[in-house]
Amino acid sequence: MESDKVNHILMMLSSKIPMESISSVRTRLENSELSEAEMMTLLTQMKDPLLSILLSVFVGTFGVDRFYIGDVGLGIGKLLTAGGCGIWWLIDIFLITDATKQKNLEQLSYYLR
C-alpha cells in the first residue's frame, strides 16, 4: 500500500488502537493487499473508545459497555451481578477504553495477516 494511504489510515486509526502498536500496524499496512475500500469498511466496524467510556459510566452496571465491545460473557456477568455490586462497574470505568482499543487491534490484526 502507498505511503500516503498508510499515513491517512493511521491517522484515522490513532484514536481506536493502542498507541504502542502504531509502528507494527504501519508495517503490516505497507505489506498489506487490502484495498482502500476494504480498509474503510473495517474502520467503520471498529468500536469507538469514547462511546465505550460513556456507556460504561451511564449503563455499565448492566454490562452494556462489555456487550458493545463484544465481550458477551463479561457483559452477562456484569448484568447478573449489577456490575459486581458497583465494584466491577467502577473498575471498568478505568479499563474499558483500553479494552476497546485492544479489541479493535485484534480485529485489525485478523485482517492484516
Image: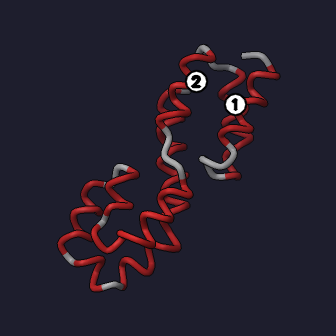
**Of the pair 81 and 50, the residue shown nearer to us:** 50
Q: Secondary structure at mark 2?
A: helix
Q: Residue furthest front?
A: 58
How far across and down, in percent of the image, does residue 69 sit? 40, 51
User: Label 1: few (<14), some or many (≥20) within 10 Å?
Assistant: some
Residue 39's disc number = 2
Instruction: Give the residue displayed 56% in from the left and 58% down from the top.
Output: 50
Q: Is residue 67 left or right of residue 31?
A: left
Residue hosting label 1: 9
**Of the pair 73 and 80, the residue shown nearer to us:** 80
C-alpha separation, residue under disc 1 versus residue under disc 2: 8 Å
Q: Quadrant of residue 8?
A: top right
Identified by mark 2, the residue type is: Met
**Of the pair 113 and 49, the residue shown nearer to us:** 49
Q: Residue furthest left?
A: 80
Instruction: Give the residue displayed 27% in from the left and 85% down from the top.
Output: 85
Counting every numbered tag in the picture gives: 2
The answer to whether marks 1 and 2 mark residues whose Cβ atoms lie closer than 8 Å is yes
How far across and down, in percent of the image, does residue 79 sit? 22, 69
Q: Reading the chain from its start, which is encountered first: label 1 or label 2?
A: 1
Q: Is residue 29 left or right of residue 70?
A: right
Instruction: Give the residue displayed 52% in from the left and 73% down from the top.
Output: 94
Q: Is residue 81 above or below residue 47?
A: below
Q: Quadrant of residue 22?
A: top right
Tell me if residue 113 can be seen. no
Q: Secondary structure at mark 1?
A: helix
User: Label 2: few (<14), some or many (≥20) within 10 Å?
Assistant: some
Q: Is residue 80 left or right of residue 72?
A: left
Q: Is residue 42 left or right of residue 67?
A: right
